[in-house]
Image (cartoon, rainbow, N blue to C red):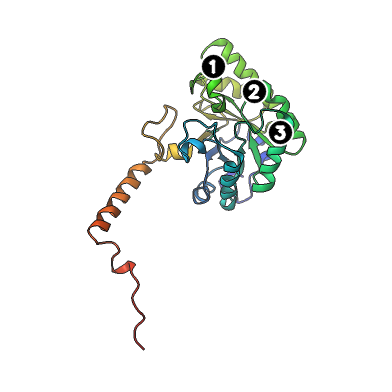
Amino acid sequence: MGMKTDKPVTTRDIRARKGGTPLVTLTAYTAPVAEILDRHCDLLLVGDSLGMVIYGMDTTLGVTMDMMIAHTTAVMRKARRACVVMDLPFGSYQESPEQAFRNSARAMAETGCHAVKIEGGTEMAETVDFLVRRGIPVLGHVGLTPQAVNTMGGFRTQGRSGPEAERILADAAAISEAGAFAVVVEGVVESLAAEITQRIAVPTIGIGASAACDGQVLVVDDMLGLFGDISPKFVKRYASLSEEIDRAVASYADEVRERSFPGEAHVFKPAPAS
Ligand code: KIV
């Protein structure tokens, strides 16, 4: 698997990568970007971070199933090889395993995505088990869980104290044992991410975690330098696309104002007289 074949990556393939070549994951929200990312990634995550990244919200809490389904459908149109996971948004799964099943089934039937992601630890283990037994592959998400921003007291690094670290380790173990094919570990101290990776049976996918994780994920707009002026410490910027866009739009604006655009190459001429 990996980059040497066009064979689609399944959730079973991902599960089997525990301790192997690290899993390359990025978020994807639109068809044209998904087409590029698909050439390089094992997993594409249609994250509910789209609420903040695409829609300018302050948190992910206002994201709806309809928004997630529209973007996942777009990503699925261009993803050929990567395994595509849709985030279940806030309020669409926490109430009961049955509610989680209904919304996961809708996501998979309407978009064709391969799996869903849900946030939470021991309290969500029963739901993960319920979904997996009914044919829905689940990616877990522990540590800093943005949908719980109000109970966590903000987006802050998790696992700094012993009891908090113990709880997060227990969360990851519960989600793994309940049948998740992998677990995202977000915003925790590095040594804890490494310990979780050693202790659980399924791959960990880190963000603000550790290079020891079985894979990494970043928000694509963050790593491309497209989103926000200040990026969190854990984001490495591989490009500065907002500067590139700013330069391009400034040139366009100048050319429109001085009437040098459209030029000869961009206008239509009448058909030559016959
Ligand atoms: O919503 C999201 O993009 C995520 C990743 C950052 C893991 O959950």
In the displayed structure, 92 sits above or below 1; it is: above
Instruction: Residue 116 in the image: state x and y as whole percent.
Output: 64, 37
Dot 2 falls on a residue whose secondary structure is loop
Q: Which residue is mark 2?
A: 121
CA neighbours of label 2 inside 10 A, class few (<14), some (14 to 19), many (20+): many
Mark 3 or 1 closer to N-term? Answer: 3
Q: Quadrant of residue 200?
A: top right
Note whether ligand 1 is within 8 Å of mark 3.
Answer: no
Q: Which residue is mark 3?
A: 99
* Count of number-bearing discs: 3
Along the line of sight, the residue nearer the viewer: 7 or 270: 270
Closer to us: mark 3 or mark 1? 3
Instruction: Residue 98 in the image: state x and y as whole percent.
Output: 74, 32
Q: Which residue is mark 1?
A: 159
- Amino acid type shown at disc 2: Gly
Instruction: Residue 248 in the image: state x and y as whole percent.
Output: 32, 50
> Where, quadrant-wise, is the N terminus in this rendering?
top right
- Amino acid type shown at disc 1: Gly
Q: Residue at x 34, y 78 (%)?
A: 270
